[in-house]
Amino acid sequence: MEIRTLGKNGPQVSALGLGTMGMSDLYGPADETEGIATIHAALDAGISLLDTGDFYGMGHNEMLIGRALRDRNRDEVNISVKFGGLRDPDLGWRGIDGRPEAVRNFLAYSLRRLGTDHIDTYRLARVDPNVPIEETIGEIAEQVKKGHVRHIGLSEAGADTIRRAHAVHPISDLQIEYSLISRGIEAQILPTVRELGIGITAYGVLSRGLLSGRWTADRQLAPDDFRSYVPRFTGDNLAANLRLVESLREIADARGATVAQVAIAWVLAQGQDIVPLVGARQRDRLTESLGALELELTPDDLAAIERAVPADSAAGTRYAAPDMVHLDSER
């Protein structure tokens, strides 16, 4: 497994990370046993980075990871946790909380659910508009001093926020959506993190399945699958985006690869400071994703991919309008 370093002072992790959200939340029913088996298969394949959020399944995801790691060497795993997302009993969303006292509270619960004495990278899930980022980062820095946290990350933060946070404590990495059809970070955010020596953990590299090569226009989603509210998955937008996928399939077929492998390999090829998170929740999907590590895209491949899926060619925003307003990275 190739190893990459997240930021000047960040952790060394596998070139691919495993995103575990779908094992507990937002993508419809999931099989716990298969989820744990997938985590084990990822670790056995050399994946050392597991990404979660304390609000995924209202703590269920952290407990799932805790069970999966009971018989594993904790020192060989980097656990990245997002915190601050507020939920209600009806599974609704109630904003974000980045207050220092909330940081301490969220962290205490995460440590217990994960069954560990430290979290490798801790990050606010979204920037809290009501709390200066300096206060949130300052409190996490205090937890670094106490040994409860090893590294501090950010999530969906814009360039100005990144600079302000980094001035308080070195930021190891920014977690943000980055894929062939989500390239907004290339204008300001990517140059900023590279100037500051901050890595990228890229989520949504398959655009929540849209770039998997398996999505069809007539696919029926479970009632609790949030993709039914995402503009890219509806109506004419979906039809336009699936045409992009078919253009990508021609390139994949020529290389003897799958569409998903080409999409992941493209993100891998964007720099050694970028670690894609693959959201596989089944072992067969994980195996397919791992195949991207063996796919070395040539300059001709990259040029063909650019022609097939140009920047800004996606139809529809990456979140519904009410959710887009919470993204500091989109301001």
Image (tube, rainbow, N blue to C red):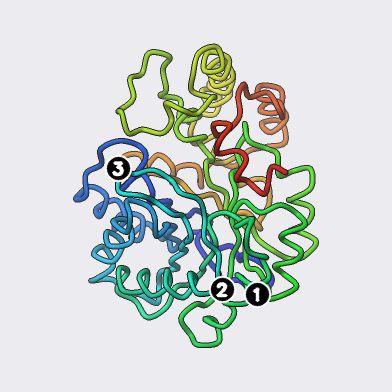
Marks 3 and 1 sit apart, C-alpha to C-alpha, by 33 Å
Amino acid type for the residue under numbered disc 2: His
- Badge 1 density bin: few <14, some 14–19, many ≥20, Cα 10 Å: some
* Residue in the image at 54% along x and 21% along y: 245
Amino acid type for the residue under numbered disc 3: Gln
Amino acid type for the residue under numbered disc 1: Asn
* Residue in the image at 49% along x and 77% along y: 149
Q: In this picture, is 161 found above or below 209?
A: below
Q: Which residue is mark 2?
A: 151
Q: Which residue is mark 3?
A: 282
Residue situated in front as seen by the camera: 331 or 250: 331
Q: Which residue is mark 1?
A: 9
* Residue in the image at 40% along x and 77% along y: 75
Reading the chain from its start, which is encountered first: label 3 or label 2? 2
Q: Nearer the viewer, mark 2 or mark 1?
A: 2
Residue 284 x/y as whole percent: 31, 40
The quarter holding residue 40 reads bottom left
Q: Are marks 2 and 1 in contact (CB under 8 Å)?
A: yes
- Position of 15 compared to 188: left or right? left
Marks 3 and 2 sit apart, C-alpha to C-alpha, by 29 Å
The quarter holding residue 330 reads top right
Labelled disc at residue 236: none
Residue 76 x/y as whole percent: 40, 72
- Position of 33 compared to 210: left or right? left
Q: Residue furthest left?
A: 33
Q: In this picture, is 77 found above or below 246?
A: below
Residue situated in front as seen by the camera: 326 or 307: 326
